[in-house]
Amino acid sequence: MQLRVAIVGRPNVGKSTLFNRLAGRRAALVDPNPGMTRDLNVSSGQIGAEDFQIVDTPGLEEADAGTLAARMSEASERALAEADLVLFMIDGRQGVTPVDREYARLARTHAREVTLLVNKCDSPALAAQAVEGFELGLGEPIPISAEHGLGIGDVEAVIAARNVPAALADADAPDQARPIPIAIVGRPNSGKSTLTNRLLGEDRMLTGPEPGITRDSVGHAWTWRGRRIELVDTAGLRRTSRVDSRPEAVSAESTRRALRFAEAAVLMLDCSEALVDQDLAIAAEVVQEGRALVVAANKWDLVRQPAAMRRALVERLDDTLPQARGVPCVALSALTGHGTSRLMQAVFTVHQRWNRRVPTPALNRWLRAQTDAHQPPRAGGRAQRLRFMTQVNVRPPTFALFANHPGGLPRSYVRYLANGLRETFDLDGVPLRIMVRKGDNPYAGKAGN
């Protein structure tokens, strides 16, 4: 079992900066605006040969019951109680505040083990003032600067001393393939975090009627039917013209970064508003990135004419995304869990197609049949010959087509070939790329041809 380390403290004391430092990558949003972190963000860290889990938490603060701030504090308190080691962080420039004292009392009561970190000690004078932290009753404070890396070695020494060697902890653990990163994307308030909680079987993500609660892209380790998954909940994407604040712009960039690293994406639609232009824009962005796509039609229990709604969704998706025709559309309710099992089955089916490789002989037999059925149009009065085709890549499936006049092959004919590929080789719903090149069969004359 990996050591679980939680970073807690007031808003804007530098928790996410330290989280990124320990994770060794930019795994959490960092911004001068307080409250950027709203959910528990979990990543892996490594010191020497030993791995551990690091948890970034929302800021602890006093708030009225039922408010967003209160729900964020509750998530932090839950992480504090579940962690093997708590790194309690205060701001060395501001000193100990009444809120620090209150939450230090919580940490002493509920946490298994606590280490006090005094952040933003960028100078010897500030480091000397860190002794003020003794009054919190959490032991000797460690002065650090998460931004500049000062004192991080001392923090790592604390973690290493508490960590259980991985060879002992995981000696009996089964060897599993690497996790598949799956991003859940969509407009704000479409139900992405509710779906994440439903799939994980626990309330890890904050949810509520307020749009834009999720600001960072938060990954969760999960297993579905024996297959490891990294499920990434993302911030909602609005039209660029409507993004009017820096936090929202930073959140949108985090979502797009998560999409670039994902292998599959689930696009959440709010069926109470049908399929709007922004949904289609997000779908087009997923396809342009070359990711496997599944559409989740959420709040299906509120739809009065499901057959007509499904038909309209499928037709509009096919019309708008011809480069990924046949995208699966799964009706579900994230709130009740209805349809979520079918969703994951659809994700894995499309992910397998996304990784599919078509044998070259079968591909060229198919190409001859396609051109016999429908000859390519002439280019500049000369016959267009499609001489050879081979798959050059997967994820997504990418094909090279060799022709005598590649510039004269119209886009409509390339679409005809793409649709034939989907139908013959079961590639529905997957972005296909066909690169037309000039030349003969590059393998002609070689042994075995």
Image (spheres, helix red, strand yellow):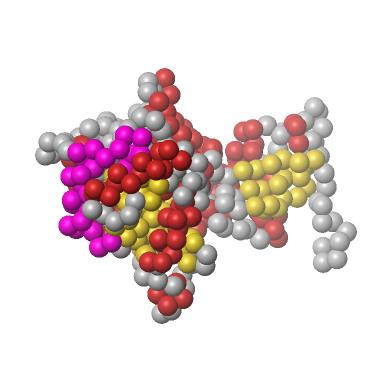
When the figure is inspected, residue 245 is found, relative to residue 102, above or below; the finding is above
In which image quadrant can residue 162 be found?
A: bottom left
- Asked if 155 appears above or below 416 in the picture, the reply is below
39 relative position to 440: left or right: left
Q: Does any portion of residue 29 appear in the rendered image?
A: no
Q: Which of 88/296 is in front?
A: 88
User: Which residue does the image show at 76% across and 45% down from the upper left?
Assistant: 402
What quarter of the picture does the C terminus occupy?
bottom right
**Is 288 drawn above or below residue 56 in the view shown?**
above
Name the residue nearer the viewer: 411 or 125: 125
Q: Position of residue 138 (x, y in %)?
A: 26, 54
Query: From this viewpoint, is residue 439 visible?
Result: yes
Residue 96 lies in the magenta stretch: yes
- Who's the residue at 52% across and 64% down the image? 48
Choose top left, top right, bottom left or bottom right for residue 83. bottom left
Per the rendered image, the range of residues in magenta is 90-113
Q: In the shown orientation, is residue 98 left or right of residue 406?
A: left
Quadrant where the N terminus is found in the figure: bottom left
Image-based side of 440 in relation to 256, left or right: right
Question: Furthest-bottom residue in view?
Answer: 172
Could you say where residue 222 lies in the image, as x and y percent from the top left? 36, 60
**Between 216 and 290, which is closer to the camera in this rendering?**
216
The residue located at (28%, 50%) in the rendering is 134
The residue depicted at 22 percent of the width and 32 percent of the height is 210
Q: Is residue 154 magenta?
A: no
